[in-house]
């Protein structure tokens, strides 16, 4: 978090361009598919960091599955990450819990379930274990998957800049 390049205005996409790939990966994992289209709004209310500092995206998947992604990095308000998936009449939400490391999952009207996570640490451990064993790297950690997540982040930023629906 202390890397100086993250605060540099020339870093395209700001914090969302950096860590948004992780949120997009979580969304794709929750839905189990590649999105077809995105629409988005991005704002910048802070002069302390490069834009955008908040992003809301509508993400359309095959089979009429629609998801929203809401991410905020603004210094003056609590950090926020939330995604919601509406598929065939049932809503599922996943929200980052910042007072303890993990996520809260709600499906339908049921009670929330907490999932503790170590995030990047687990990914690195899986990658190192695969490398030491001679491979292969788990599919979710492949370069192709990372590039797809980046492509979706760029589509969200482009949709926000153009005010139009963007194909992924």
Image: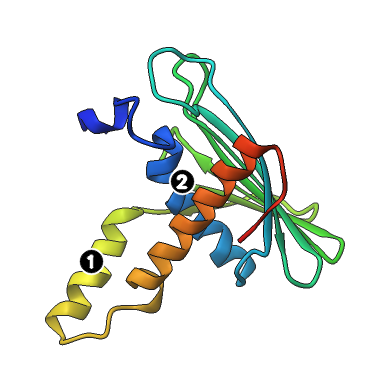
Q: Nearer the viewer, mark 2 or mark 1?
A: 2
Q: Residues within 10 Å of mark 2 (few under 14, many from 20)?
A: many
Residue at the disc numbered 2: 20
Question: Where's residue 168, x and y in %?
Answer: 60, 61
In-image side of 149 versus 60 (left or right):
left
In the orientation shown, which residue stands out farthest toward the left? 132
Residue 62 lies in what quarter of the image?
bottom right
Question: Where's residue 1, x and y in %?
Answer: 27, 33
Regarding residue 5, the answer to whether it shows in the image is yes
Question: Where's residue 42, x and y in %?
Answer: 60, 31
In the orientation shown, which residue stands out farthest toward the right? 89
In-image side of 23 versus 105 (left or right):
left
Image: 42 above or below 150 = above
Residue occupying image coordinates x 24% and y 32%: 5
Residue 92 lies in what quarter of the image?
bottom right
Residue at the disc numbered 1: 125
In-image side of 136 versus 102 (left or right):
left
Residue occupying image coordinates x 50% and y 50%: 153
Regarding residue 101, the answer to whether it shows in the image is no
């Amino acid at each position: 978090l202390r890397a100086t390049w993250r605060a540099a205005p020339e870093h395209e996409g700001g914090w969302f361009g950096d860590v948004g790939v992780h949120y997009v990966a979580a969304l794709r994992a929750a839905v189990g598919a590649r999105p077809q289209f995105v629409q988005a709004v991005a704002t910048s209310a802070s002069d302390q960091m490069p834009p955008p500092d908040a992003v809301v995206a509508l993400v359309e998947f095959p089979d009429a599955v629609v998801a929203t992604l809401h991410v905020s990095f603004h210094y003056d308000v609590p950090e926020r990450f939330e995604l919601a998936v509406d598929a065939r009449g049932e809503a599922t939400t996943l929200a980052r819990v910042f007072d303890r490391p993990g996520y809260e999952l709600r499906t339908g009207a049921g009670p929330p379930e907490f999932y503790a996570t170590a995030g990047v640490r687990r990914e690195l451990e899986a990658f190192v274990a695969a490398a030491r064993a001679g491979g292969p790297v788990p599919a979710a950690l492949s370069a192709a998957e990372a590039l797809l997540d980046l492509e979706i982040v760029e589509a969200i930023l482009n949709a926000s800049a153009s005010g139009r629906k963007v194909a992924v």
